[in-house]
Amino acid sequence: MNNRNLVIICVCVTIIALAIAASAYFQKGQPSEQYSVVYLTSGEVYVGKLSYFPTMTITDAYLIQIVKDETDAAKTSFQLSPLSKTIWSPEILRINQDQVIFSGPISETSQVMQTIKNGASAPK
């Protein structure tokens, strides 16, 4: 094989590799329009638009917390708090994937999704 053919092959392989990397970046790098849940080893549960590339990130995030029921101390309920309303108000959360127990998409008909759509903050 002569040097000219070797150069052509190297250029083609480089172009293909760059095209694959760019495709992965633009497809996986953008947050999904679908909301997902992420459960961490710390016990925190986040809901938001998830992205995996180049690192796991959540945008438009909410924190799900367990709170005591105000009417009955023996009962608990859930509170959905938008992180945009917190004092530190992050636009994006970078998640250490080693700390994720599970993650998955949220159904459009779920109580959490209905709460997000209605702008409320306390599904029960």
Image (cartoon, rainbow, N blue to C red):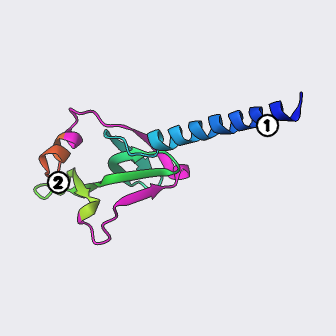
Q: Residue furthest bottom?
A: 87
Answer with left or right where residue 61 lies relative to residue 40: left
Q: Nearer the viewer, mark 1 or mark 2?
A: 1
Query: Between 7 and 92, which is closer to the camera in this rendering?
Result: 7
N-terminal label among 1 and 2:
1
Residue highlighted by disc 2: 121
Q: What whole-number distance in Å separates the C-alpha atoms at marks 1 and 2? A: 60 Å
In the rendered image, is residue 41 in sight?
Answer: yes
79 vs 48, left or right, is: left
Task: Report x, y in % for residue 48.
Answer: 32, 48
Q: Residue at x 35, y 41 (%)?
A: 36
Assign the N terminus to one quadrant of the image.
top right
Residue at the (34%, 46%) spot, across then down: 49
Q: Type of residue at label 2? A: Ser
Asked whether residue 124 appears in the rendered view, the answer is no
Image spot of residue 79 (x, y percent): 22, 54
Q: Crowding at label 2, few (<14), some or many (≥20) Cα neighbours within 10 Å?
A: some
The local secondary structure at tag 2 comes to loop
Q: Tell me where residue 63 sits by quadrant.
A: bottom left
Q: Residues within 10 Å of mark 1 (few under 14, many from 20)?
A: few
At x 53%, y 42%, the residue is: 22
What's the residue type where badge 1 is placed? Val
* Residue 81 magenta-highlighted: no
Q: Which residue is mark 1?
A: 7
The secondary structure type at the circle numbered 1 is: helix
The relative height of residue 8 versus residue 93 in the rendered view (above or below) is above
Span of residues in magenta = 85-113
The dot on residue 48 is none
Name the residue nearer the viewer: 124 or 24. 24
Q: Residue furthest front?
A: 4
As for residue 93 lying within the magenta part, the answer is yes
